[in-house]
Image (cartoon, grey):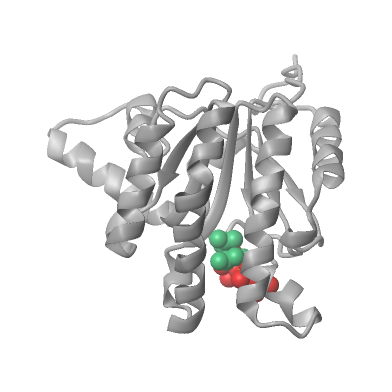
Amino acid sequence: MAEKQHIPPRHVAVIMDGNGRWAKRRLLPRAAGHRAGMERMISLAEHAFGCGIKYFTLFALSTENLSRPAEELGALFSLFREYFGRHVGALKEKGVRLNVIGDASLLPPDIAEAAKRGEALTAGGEKGTLTFAIGYGGRREIVAAANEAVRRGREVTEEEFASLLWTGELPPPDLLIRTGGEMRISNFLLWQAAYAELYFTDTLFPDFGGEEFDAALREYASRERRFGKL
Ligand code: IPE
Ligand code: IPE
Ligand code: MG
């Protein structure tokens, strides 16, 4: 028997791609695209939790993105600073718990600290969990978990291994959305997305609004999840 759909999915993850092209089409600097992306991210998270989604995970900066030019990284880091500084209070008010994943040692220390403070401030939130992946790479995450298993000195089960990943206690994503037209995963949630339903759209992230998000949820609801079974 095929698994019946949860409507809505419990965990939705988004690869937020297309900010640069959004800016280029408007003859704006790439940083303007990232700012528009951040504003979109804030409104989309609110929409998603309003739809009853319990876990909403956003891919904002990959380990590979860290090799982009210093000017672009500087703009992205400024936006993260602004986000953690300005927006965490609103998350707390709404009962949303902030969770930041990635290799914190790859980030400017003040951003890593602001992320930790935001997590601590919102720790009691019960409406949902907003996970923000920065300095995140699926391969790096898997290697870190494997090294931790080695340190523990014994073989681990799939469940134990999953608990050693940065996503720790999060359930695996049910629906993985990628905006911006590319049909690839780009090192995101490699382990966790094994049975995620995939939704690709050409819409550039700053243009990806609530209506299209709802369309992705409807598409998800129409999928039959078999998990390899009959
Ligand atoms: C996604 O937008 C955000 C990050 C990767 C930081 P891009 O910056 O990749 O935008 P495009 O793909 O160049 O349009
Ligand atoms: C994926 O976008 C990473 C994020 C959205 C954070 P990229 O723009 O880095 O992906 P590629 O280079 O097109 O695979
Ligand atoms: Mg891109």
Residue sitting at x 42%, y 64%: 63
In the visual, does 162 lie left or right of 173? left
Residue 121, percent from left and from top: 39, 34
In this rendering, the answer to whether 206 lies above or below 13 is below
Q: Quadrant of residue 27?
A: bottom right
Quadrant location, the C terminus: top right
Residue sitting at x 73%, y 57%: 179
Q: Nearer the viewer, residue 205 or 217?
A: 205
Ligand 1 lies in quarter: bottom right
Residue 184, percent from left and from top: 65, 60
Q: Looking at this view, name the residue that lies furthest to the top.
A: 1
Q: Nearer the viewer, residue 18 or 123?
A: 123
Q: Quadrant of residue 210?
A: top right
Q: Quadrant of residue 168?
A: top left
The reply to whether residue 166 is visible in this rendering is no
Quadrant location, the N terminus: top right
